[in-house]
Image (spheres, rainbow, N blue to C red):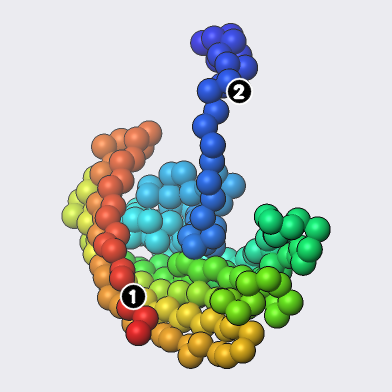
Amino acid sequence: MKSSLLTLAPLALFVCLPVSASGLFLQEAVYANQGAAGAGDGVYTGSAASIWVNPAVMSFMQGNKTTVNGLVFDLGVDYYDQDNPSVRNGNSQDYIGSAAMFHVQQLTEDLHLGLSVATAGGSGLDYSANWAGDLQLENINLLTLQFNPSLSYKINDQWSVAVGAQINFASMDARMVKSDLSSESDWALGYNAGVVYQPSEQLTLGLSYRSKVEHDFN
């Protein structure tokens, strides 16, 4: 099996597809297994951050847990004038912070309370007032913050279910070189739910759902 993988690995270089990254989803701060891009978070019990993916996993945690994450992103983007690349080239330099706090509190033997506060997404651009498009946009920032309380109930040694509420706050502001666009903020509500099934000590299965949260900026 190992030799087959080594043989096939070089072939992957010839079938790689283009990859696009999105600056709106700053999920790194809400990963429990950050080094594995959140893989296995739906059943992971070693960090309270896993309740963001699946709150039902609280029922299989031992006692109380607290996790705090914080990151700073450098969102700098180099740009140039396509019609005249030698004129007014520059860099859109902006920084954005992403923070999260998760706490699991055991209320009874079968009931757990989870509290999550996280920067679920956001982005920012700052071109300054000296670039060719400054009449249309100088800078823009979008930031969201979500408070996500949840409850988990352990039905038996194998099954647990959970439900939570998403309370989302979003703020957006933008500025042009000659005028300020008024800042806007909005609140939105959603929900999330999860279930965990552990048929044996060697196998744990998790299933979760997080509803859409839609903001409206006037």
Residue drawn at 26 percent across, 70 percent down: 190
Is any part of residue 203 visible from this angle?
yes
Labels 2 and 1 touching (C-beta < 8 A): no
Up-down relation of residue 201 to residue 217 (above or below): above
Give the image quarter of residue 78: bottom right
First of labels 2, 1 by sequence position:
2
Up-down relation of residue 18 to residue 176 (above or below): above
Q: Amino acid at mark 2?
A: Leu
Residue drawn at 56 percent across, 76 percent down: 136
Residue farthest to the right, as pictured: 86
Q: Is residue 14 left or right of residue 93?
A: left
Disc 1 secondary structure class? loop
Badge 1 local density, few (<14 within 10 Å), some, or many (20+)? Answer: some
Residue drawn at 68 percent across, 71 percent down: 132
Badge 2 local density, few (<14 within 10 Å), some, or many (20+)? Answer: few
Image spot of residue 2 (x, y percent)? 56, 13
Image spot of residue 191 (x, y percent)? 26, 67
Residue drawn at 30 percent across, 35 percent down: 200
How much space separates mark 2 and mark 1, taking CA atoms? 40 Å
Up-down relation of residue 196 to residue 171 (above or below): above
Is any part of residue 110 visible from this angle?
no
Instruction: Name the residue that disc number 1 marks.
Output: 215
Q: Amino acid at mark 1?
A: His
Instruction: Name the residue that disc number 2 marks.
Output: 13
